[in-house]
């Protein structure tokens, strides 16, 4: 028992947690930014899947991961702009569009896997150009820091940097204030002279980039294959983490780390014949509990306030 | 009435656009459009195996679509139908395999009732969270779908594993099997149960005060409160019915089609059902036709993939494009206005 615990609370698990978290984190941030303008981007899952597919396809054909990552971002933008137009111009329910789009992404990538890459189910290219790992050669590989930071790719650092960049943009800039006001009260924002439509397009645009990059990282960073339905609920996990963190980038990061940790520790516990499904279930349950708890507290506060007046 | 007609235009328009996109894809892949569509249609209806497969696909799509539509009647989007379906399926599989000494009618009824109860109980969680605390039900049900998926996967690989290599439960006893027809297809008499359930639901919602109370609680809970309807209770009941139908869909799949619970047997069945309900704008009366249409497409796609170079995913892609277009309420209006404006301009020229 002690031996299992020792294995769980180790630097290796922490290291794996960070790496497993990155794709979820990127897609969670893409949900955070739209949520600030009151758009529930349920289509993030589909954006991610398309990003993964185009990322690996372009990296494979061009021989450069940069092209692959860019392709992921571009397809993310195209997808999110499509959803934005459907939602903003043609009054489609964003939830319906997002869900239908997720199904579309699964079908399209399966179709593309057949037609463009001549494979079924899985695509494993040889000599794929992947997102480079950052080797901090000046660190002693046996030291604490060296072991903690071993083997991270560029995007692992980028994602963490984006947490703070996004936090700054949302809470400390004028643009962020405008976006938040659109989310809080659209009519009030409109009458204060904010172009609400434009703000919504802008957040969807950014969301597309983040989700697309998250997908590209999945296929040419975190792994170097493409598997049918590869995002496998990571987009939904990202949306859940966003709710977990109340759409605050930093708390959302915490939420994604829970998902990452449960998967990393699940891998370890499996070695001890512990059913990994139970571990994998925990973050989903925990998010439900936290959602319920935070709303319960909000409700309790509201009743208390009503009583004083 | 006018709105109703607009809706039909919208569906027709979307269908035509999806058809055109499909034709373009087929031509680009070097196939003859007419040949492919011919195979698609014959693949859905020609012969007992093919038509039976259409009916087999129809039942779970139809039931999950009804389940989703019922939840929207109380103004909740129950995406958790998938979870109810999975848990109902495994409950039915376990009852079917481990309970012995019952006559078929009792065994099947027992397994289905347990599936229904489990499905409804599962829907109770998001319902109570939504009603009591106003927690966003879309998020909760998506999360709970994963909980259901992992939980059933734990059960099927652990306590109830058949130990045969594939992650599945023991095969159910013959007394729990729902009979099939149109052999060698897997079409089964579950379809009769589905149709009966449909008419009961339709009757409840269009003819009874109980149905009226439920619908009203979804439309305007404040109004309901003032006329003395316990809208909270009604909305929870609506969700319970939704979950129950989801559980039933899972139960029928196990007892009628598979004979055991196989991990991953339902790849997003309830999502497809939800999309069917969304195409029908959650109108119960339109669901059967659309569910049958989608089931026929999916069944025909199997033949299409076998006899042509067009992958099966093309059909799923077209279905999702179809739904995306239907969802855009505004798009038909925009086109209509464009046509009207063009006409006006031409008239002004004359």
Image (cartoon, rainbow, N blue to C red):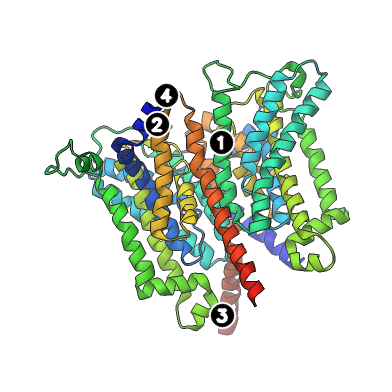
Residue B14, position as x, y percentages in the image: 59, 55
Badge 4 marks a residue whose secondary structure is: loop
For discs 4 and 2, the disc positioned in front in the rendered view: 4
Q: Pointer 2 and pointer 1: residues touching (CB < 8 Å)?
A: no
Residue A155, position as x, y percentages in the image: 28, 49
Q: Name the residue under label 4.
A: A272
Q: Residue B345 carries which label?
A: 3
> Which residue corresponds to the image point at 43% horizontal and 50% vertical from the top-left?
A255
Badge 3 marks a residue whose secondary structure is: helix
Residue A259, position as x, y percentages in the image: 43, 44
Q: Which mark is residue A98?
A: none
Residue A89 shows in the view = yes
> Which residue corresponds to the image point at 20% horizontal and 45% vertical from the top-left?
A134
Q: Is residue A115 above or below residue B12?
A: above
Q: Residue A267 carries which label?
A: 2
Q: In which quarter of the image is the N terminus of chain A?
A: top left
Q: Is residue B300 left or right of residue B8?
A: left
């Amino acid at each position: 028992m002690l031996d299992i615990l020792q294995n769980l609370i180790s630097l290796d698990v922490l290291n794996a947690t960070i790496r497993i978290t990155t794709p979820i984190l990127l897609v969670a941030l893409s949900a955070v930014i739209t949520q600030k303008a009151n758009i529930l981007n349920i289509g993030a899952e589909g954006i991610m899947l398309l990003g993964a597919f185009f990322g690996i396809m372009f990296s494979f054909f061009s021989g450069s991961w940069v092209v692959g990552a860019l392709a992921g971002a571009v397809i993310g933008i195209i997808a999110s702009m499509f959803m934005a137009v459907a939602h903003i111009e043609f009054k489609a329910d964003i939830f319906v569009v997002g869900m239908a789009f997720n199904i579309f992404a699964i079908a399209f990538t399966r179709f593309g896997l057949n037609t463009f890459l001549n494979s079924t189910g899985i695509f494993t290219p040889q000599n794929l150009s992947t997102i480079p790992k950052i080797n901090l050669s000046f660190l002693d590989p046996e030291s604490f820091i060296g072991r903690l930071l071993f083997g991270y790719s560029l995007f692992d650092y980028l994602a963490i940097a984006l947490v703070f960049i996004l936090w700054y943009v949302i809470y400390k800039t004028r643009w962020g204030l405008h976006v938040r006001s659109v989310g809080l009260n659209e009519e009030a924002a409109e009458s204060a002279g904010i172009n609400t439509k434009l703000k919504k397009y802008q957040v969807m645009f950014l969301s597309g980039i983040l989700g697309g990059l998250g997908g590209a990282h999945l296929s040419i960073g975190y792994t170097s294959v493409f598997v049918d339905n590869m995002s496998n609920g990571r987009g939904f996990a990202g949306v859940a983490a966003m709710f977990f963190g109340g759409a605050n980038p930093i708390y959302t990061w915490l939420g994604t780390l829970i998902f990452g940790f449960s998967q990393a520790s699940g891998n370890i516990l499996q070695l001890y014949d512990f059913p990994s499904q139970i571990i994998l279930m925990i973050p989903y349950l925990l998010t439900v509990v936290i959602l319920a708890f935070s709303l319960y507290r909000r409700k309790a506060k509201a009743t208390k306030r009503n009583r004083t007046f | 009435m006018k709105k109703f007609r607009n809706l039909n235009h919208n569906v027709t328009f979307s269908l035509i656009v999806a058809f055109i996109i499909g034709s373009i894809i087929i031509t680009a892949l070097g196939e003859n459009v007419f040949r492919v569509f011919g195979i698609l249609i014959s693949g859905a209806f020609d012969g007992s195996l093919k038509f039976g497969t259409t009916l087999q696909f129809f039942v779970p799509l139809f039931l999950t679509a009804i389940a989703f539509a019922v939840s929207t009647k109380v103004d909740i989007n129950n995406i958790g139908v998938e979870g109810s379906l999975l848990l109902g399926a495994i409950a039915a599989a376990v009852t079917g395999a481990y309970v012995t000494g019952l006559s078929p009618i009792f065994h099947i009824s027992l397994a289905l009732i347990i599936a229904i109860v489990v499905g409804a109980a599962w829907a109770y969680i998001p319902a109570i969270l939504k009603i009591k605390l106003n927690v966003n039900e879309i998020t909760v049900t998506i999360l709970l779908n994963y909980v259901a998926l992992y939980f059933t996967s734990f059960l099927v690989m652990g306590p109830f594993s058949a130990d045969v290599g594939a992650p599945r439960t023991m095969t159910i006893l013959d007394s729990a099997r729902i009979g099939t027809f149109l052999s060698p297809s897997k079409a089964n008499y579950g379809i009769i149960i589905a149709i009966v359930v449909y008419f009961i639901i339709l009757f409840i919602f269009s003819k009874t005060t109980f149905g009226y109370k439920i619908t009203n609680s979804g439309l305007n809970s404040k109004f309901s409160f003032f006329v003395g309807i316990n809208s909270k209770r009604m909305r929870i009941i609506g969700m319970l019915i939704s979950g129950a139908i989801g559980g039933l869909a899972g139960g029928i799949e196990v007892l009628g089609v598979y004979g055991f619970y196989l991990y991953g047997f339902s790849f997003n069945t309830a999502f497809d059902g939800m999309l069917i309900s969304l195409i029908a704008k959650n109108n119960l009366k339109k669901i059967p036709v659309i569910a049958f249409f989608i089931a026929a497409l999916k069944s025909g796609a199997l033949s299409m993939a076998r006899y042509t170079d067009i992958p099966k995913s093309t059909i799923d892609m077209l279905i999702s494009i179809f739904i995306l277009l239907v969802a855009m309420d505004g798009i038909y209006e925009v086109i209509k206005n464009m046509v009207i404006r063009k006409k006006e301009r031409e008239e002004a020229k004359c």
